[in-house]
Image (cartoon, rainbow, N blue to C red):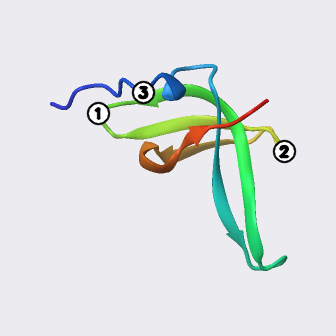
Amino acid sequence: MTNPCTLRRHRPWSHVGWQHWSPVTQQWEWITGTVLSHRGEQRLIEIRLDATNETVLRPCGYIDEAPR
């Protein structure tokens, strides 16, 4: 059993983001969204994306706080 994540930015309703390389624009782009849940035992964060309202699961290691 693993301990739950204690990072404040990974708590539900936090606004988070990460960078993604776009093959279309050939540059780094920010993807942002709102944390819905953090699955500490799996080290995954469920995030609702700002741009599409889609829900995704991402590894928590590289998710950072994003400005609103």
On the image, the x and y values in percent for residue 64 come to 56, 41
Name the residue: 48% across, 22% down: 8
Residue under pointer 1: 41
Q: Residue flagged by tag 2: what amino acid is it?
A: Ala
Residue type at mark 3: give it: Leu
Q: Position of residue 15 (x, y in %)?
A: 67, 29
Q: In the rendered image, which quarter is residue 4 located in?
A: top left
Which residue is tagged 3? 7
Coordinates of residue 22 in the picture (x, y in percent): 74, 72
Where 43 sits versus 22, above or below? above
Dot 2 or dot 3: first in sequence order is: 3
Q: Amino acid at mark 1?
A: Glu
According to the image, label 2 marks what residue?
51
Circle 2 SS class: loop
Query: Marks 1 and 3, how far apart in space?
Result: 14 Å
Circle 3 crowding by C-alpha within 10 Å: few under 14, some 14–19, many from 20:
few
The residue sitting at 53% across, 27% down in the picture is: 9
Q: Nearer the viewer, residue 61 or 57?
A: 61
